[in-house]
Amino acid sequence: MFSSLTIKEFLTQLGSSRPTPGGGGAAALAGAQAAALVTMVARLTAGKKAFAAIEERIQEVIADGDHRQQELATFIDHDAKAFQAVMAAYALPRATPEQKQSRNLTLQAALKSATETPLSIARHCVAIVRLAGDMAEVGNPHIITDAGTAALLAEAALAGAILQAQINLKAIKDSQYVEQTQVEITFLVMAAREGRERALAAVEKKLS
Amino acid sequence: MFSSLTIKEFLTQLGSSRPTPGGGGAAALAGAQAAALVTMVARLTAGKKAFAAIEERIQEVIADGDHRQQELATFIDHDAKAFQAVMAAYALPRATPEQKQSRNLTLQAALKSATETPLSIARHCVAIVRLAGDMAEVGNPHIITDAGTAALLAEAALAGAILQAQINLKAIKDSQYVEQTQVEITFLVMAAREGRERALAAVEKKLS
């Protein structure tokens, strides 16, 4: 498990000439950090008199944020495995027509899996950007910049994950799958931008 | 040292109700990840015949990226310490005019230090966005999306760090310092946007 490495060890592996962990894993960790920042803001809002009216919502944010943080930490590994499966499929023999066909089927399945993994990272990140927007708007204003940083990191993590999905999509032959996925990507990018703009508008109002 | 924690432990501390590590530390780690991704792309470009003409530049990118990655990892700690110093200054007694004056001097110095720390993170991140742009333009095209993700994460880390700097700037009385710092912030934000746009333009050209 990459999340059992120390930060120093993880950074060394990320920077090495080994292709995993790579951009997808870095995006998953940045998304997990954004989720953690959201729950920090929620925890420093919870139980305070001034925010009693929204206590129930705050507790939901903590539970949802904790869950997504843990999920995203496991996606550092999922992403590496999905990438390795694509590399393994490319390395399969293709001397005979049967081998070619078999390699092709394995490769196409691996490419879809290596698209779905960063897409899942991106879906979590959209949810986190929205939670960050909520916390920036109604949470403890003393730590509003942490909610803003969460929104920025989650949006960048989403955009990075989507780059990884798109390079795999380029090699996928199932045009219906490619089209449907591009539609979802457009939605995810728009939703993240909206959430980040909402979070930063609340932060800037406080800073000005 | 936060970088000696496992990723899981760091995320738990980041998400806890303790205010440190917070947004500045998360920004430092995201910037360190971006630096690591840049060096991965550079290492997977180095020593290859097709890129022999730029080998010297690639080696510079590796050396610079490694250095900035290690520096940014230490900034997770610097940022926490700078924040704690501000909190400690706010907690100083202010019963007498002498106490008030002493508290004020300590607080203003702590606020400047807690502005300089995220600014240093942001300066490293601008350099990393530019390295990512260079790698996206001339590096190994098979891993160009990793250079794109590096640019995205470094720009978000910069923007997050700047939010932390700005909330401290708000309480700083030295108007010349505030003005000069705002000028630098404007420059850093512009330079990061340019670098990220350059990196993503190269990635999109490859993806389209």
Image: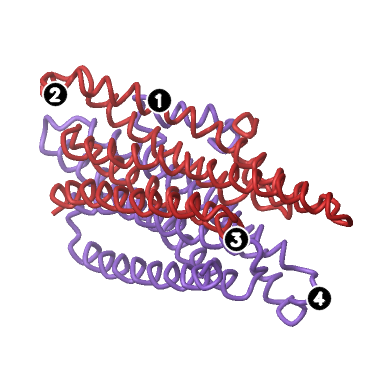
Chain colours: A purple, B red
For label 4, the residue is: A49
Label 1 close to label 3 by CB (< 8 Å): no
Image quadrant occupied by the N terminus of chain A: top right
Label 3 to label 2: alpha-carbon separation = 43 Å
Q: Nearer the viewer, mark 1 or mark 2?
A: 1
For the residues beneath circles 1 and 2, the answer to whether they share a chain is: yes
Q: Amino acid at mark 4?
A: Lys
Q: How many marks?
A: 4
Label 3 close to label 2 by CB (< 8 Å): no
Can you give x and y, in whole percent of width and height, for residue A104 in the image?
19, 44
Outermost residue to the right: B95
Depth check, front residue: B89 or A16: B89
Can you give x and y, in whole percent of width and height, for residue B79 in the image?
60, 41
Label 4 close to label 2 by CB (< 8 Å): no
For the residues beneath circles 4 and 3, the answer to whether they share a chain is: yes
For label 1, the residue is: B66
For label 3, the residue is: A38
Label 3: element kind: helix
Crowd class of label 3 (few under 14; some 14 to 19; many from 20; radius 10 Å): many
For the residues beneath circles 1 and 3, the answer to whether they share a chain is: no
Residue B132 occupies quadrant: top left
Instruction: From the viewer's perspective, tell me whether residue A52 is left or right of residue B6.
Output: right
